[in-house]
Structure formats: structure tokens, C-alpha cells
Amino acid sequence: MITGKNYIGNLLASTGKVKFKTFNPQENKENDVVFSEASEAEIEVAVALASEAFKVFRNISGAKKSEFLNQIANEIEDLGDELIKTYCLESGLPEGRAVGERGRTIFQLRTFANLVKEGSWVEATIDTADPNRQPIPKVDIRKMLIPIGPVVVFGASNFPLAYSTAGGDTASALASGCPVIVKSHPMHAGTGELVASAIINAAEKTGMPNGVFSNLNSSGIEVGMKLVKHPEVKAVGFTGSVGGGRALYDLASKRLEPIPVFAEMGSVNPVIILPEAAKNKGNEWAKTYAGSITMGSGQFCTNPGLILGIKGADLSNFIQKLSEEIVKIEPTCMLHPNIIGAFESKKVNMQKQKGLQTAASFSDEINTNFGRQTITTVEGATFLKNTTLHQEVFGPFSMVVQCENAQQLEEIISNLEGQLTGTVLAEKEELEKYSTIVNALQNRVGRIIFNGVPTGVEVCAAMVHGGPYPASTDSRFTAVGINSIKRWVRPFSFQSWPNEMLPDELKNENPLKISRVIDGMRIDN
């Protein structure tokens, strides 16, 4: 049952005066439940509880944290149809998407549960003492990763489950030993409350300290700003716009004690279609990309918003075929009137730019809050001169840049802002011929794809979901996969410490049987 209240640790509260409702974009009306924005007092209590919980939670064993994470997954499954129904009512997304995203959320939780149960993720490193070393003796030093403290996670508008309340940021932070305070997204506050109840139930059933998790409602930016500025908060996870992520980053950097903000932000995910690929498979790629651009109404951070090729008959044919294919696809509902309003505004602004031509736009009647997919095209020289054309249009929109030659293509890529992904559509032999272009693309992205689409982010150890700014605020880290846990930890060394007082991960006898590096050699168990 959805109450509209905040979870302040394991208690529900609603002392705040600001009230709001979520919105059903399919039916173009507000949903029934009234939500209470967290008051300043509730924020203070939530942070204080998290700070106290950290003193205990940071030292809880990997085995116990694994039980906690697995129980969260169980509790989410037990929410059943109510979660799926609420998700759809608040997002306008179809049931199949909701079920798939729930599955991904549960998979992430269980993956981190397995990671912390095994334990080697802490990167235990031991350099033993050598009292006979000359000219000075060597002391015993042992290092491992330790959690940094309470983390604030901002729910994402476009992924009510996988990137929100119990999504990747929360799962990885809890796995690391950091309590989490979620600033719930106002567009899907009901979904957030249901998932929050699952986390609280799991915490109670597995004996986690009160305050290990809180869920705060907010209709605007005030609650998030207060959380980021709070001195007891030690890190922030954010998925959203460049403007929102940069504002949080700047706010955190101005604190008396600056803290890291791991923000995954905007990306147009450039796609390079090389000449032989355009010649041999242009029609095939056009149909594939029409589907990719319109998938989920283009509301993915990995949506292919920019396609680059070398001018010629084959590229012209690709543009024509892409234009034909994209208007065959029925538009779908976007997440919220604010989302579609921003989409239409940015699209119109793009179409006003000198030299930009609209190649295709869905023109038939559509329902309210449905997005009209659009393909535009522009000359390479124009694109280079006008950085407005580089900006993301969040929705079913893509721009094809027609470059004069390979040199101009490389120049354009080298001058792009940082991106989450880059894709190369090519015949294999073209990769060597155009190696400088591929190298330039690698320098601007976090993940490079060969003959595929960027939409879809596999949750695995090898995945990098991040990239040079503004794709993310720190390109050294990923927001997806087991290595995302490294955002919430710091390396810590014990020098000349008594063996019996060391953490189990660093003791001589290795009671956890984890993989460690000892005097420069990897030792498994």
C-alpha cells in the first residue's frame, strides 16, 4: 500500500507542508495518491540515522550484507503486480518494460550479493615486513578498500527501478558498506515508496541497523540540495541531465568538506557509418537504427542522437532509407508532460539552427504526451562551427552529419564533448584503414561498439557506463556492473598493526579465503 509518506529509517513520516501527486502520461491526468515532501527536520533525522548506522554497517561481514541484498531482491519480487501497475501508471511505459526492468534490478542486487559474499572485491594487498632490508628496514603495510560513509542517491526519471530506489547506485553503495538516502524522483514517487518498503523490510529481517536506508520525497530541488550540502553526507550518485548533474557537482565542491558526485549525464552517443558499411548494408542499418532511435521514445541515455558519415551517394541513400523507416514506426508515450515539453522545445531550437534540414518527422495524428520522431541532417562544416548542434535532444531524435572527407570526420569526432558510447558501423577491413578515426572516437567515449546499437547496457564486470565529461563527472568509474562499487570506497592502509586486530581480509591466516596480493604476487585462497 502506498501512503505518500517518507521512510525515515524504518519509520513513515509526513510532517512536511509541500504536497504533490505523480502523473499518468498515458491518460494525461494526475494519479490519486498525495505525497509529502520531506521536511528539513525529516532530512536531519534521516542523515543522523544514516551516520549512526554507518558505524555498525561498515563493519558488517560480506556474508551478512549478501543476505541483506538478496532479501531486498526477494521483497521486490513479493511486491508483485502492485509494483508493475504503479510503475506503468507513473511512467507511461508498457508492462513488458516494467517487468524487464524489475528483472534487471533484481539481477543487480543478486550480483552484488554474490560479489560481497565472495569478498575479493576489497583488493586486499599485503606487503610484509623485512627487518633486514638495507639501508632501512621495511615495515608491514596492508591495504584494502573501505566504505566512505552515507551516500545520497537521486532517482532517475527514465528508469523508475533499475536506476532509482534500489537501482545500481543503491545496490552498489549498500554492498560497499555505505548507508543510502534516496532522493526519490517526483515522477515515480509511488514506485519509489513500494521499493523503499521492500528495502526496509529486508533490513529488518536481516538485522541491519536502523538508518541503513531512507527514502525522501521531493517535488523540486530543495530536498536534494539540502542533502548534498549536509556535512554527514559523503558522496552522491546521480543519473539525469547535464544541468542537474553539474549543479550538484558544483554544490558538493563548494562544501567545507568537498565530496565526490558520481553523475551520469548527457550523451548523444555518436555513430560512425563508414563508406563500405553504408554501401553494403546501408538499408539494413537504416532499419535497425530507426528502431533504436525510437525505442522507449528515445528516452535512454544511450540513444543514438548523432550519426556521422562521409558525404556521397551511399550516405544519402542511408539518410533516405532511415527517413522512410522511422516514420513507419508508431510513436509511443513519453514519461511526463515536462519531458515531452523539453523534447519539443529542444527539437524546435535545433530545427531553427542555420544549415540544419529536417529529413523526416512523423506527421500523423498522435496521442497527448506522445513524441514525434525526427531525423535531421547537416553539413560537417556547419556542425563544427555551431556547438548548439552537439547538444542532446532527449527523445526520439537523431542528426546525421555529412562530412566532406575522412579528415573532417576525424576533426568532428575529436571536437565532440565526452560521450557514454561510440559506435562504428564498418566492414572489418575498414577498421585498419580508418584507425585514426576509431582512435579519436575511443578518446571521447567510455564504451565503443562495433556493428551494433548503443541502446542497451549489459550488467557485467566488463561494462563501462561512463565517459569523459559531460557524459559523467569522473570517467575513471562506471555506473553499471560490479566495478561501480568502487565509487563508494577509498583505499586504506594498516601499518605494523597486530595481526589479531586486523580486518579478516588482511589477517595472515586469510579466514575469508579471498584472493589477495602478497609481496607483489597474486595468491588465490
Image: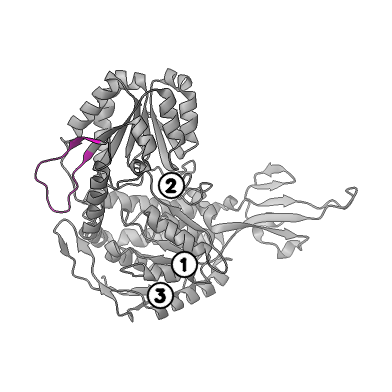
Identify the residue under disc 1: 228
Q: Which one is earlier in the sequence, the residue at label 2 or at label 3?
A: 3
Of the numbered discs in the image, which one, if any, rests on residue 86?
none
Q: Is residue 76 above or below residue 455?
A: below
Give percent across and percent down for residue 444: 47, 38
- Which quarter of the rendering shows the N terminus? bottom left
Q: Is residue 203 left or right of residue 511?
A: left
Disc 1, SS: helix
Amino acid residing under circle 3: Asn
Crowding at dot 2, Cα within 10 Å, few <14 / some 14-19 / many 20+, comes out as: many
Q: Residue at x 32, y 46 (%)?
A: 300
Identify the residue under disc 2: 471
Q: Nearer the viewer, residue 11 or 238?
A: 238
Q: Is residue 507 magenta?
A: no
Of the numbered discs in the image, which one, if any, rests on residue 10?
3
Marks 2 and 3, how far apart in space?
Answer: 35 Å
Q: Residue at x 30, y 20 (%)?
A: 312
Q: Which residues are magenta?
A: 357-374
Q: Which one is earlier in the sequence, the residue at label 2 or at label 1?
A: 1
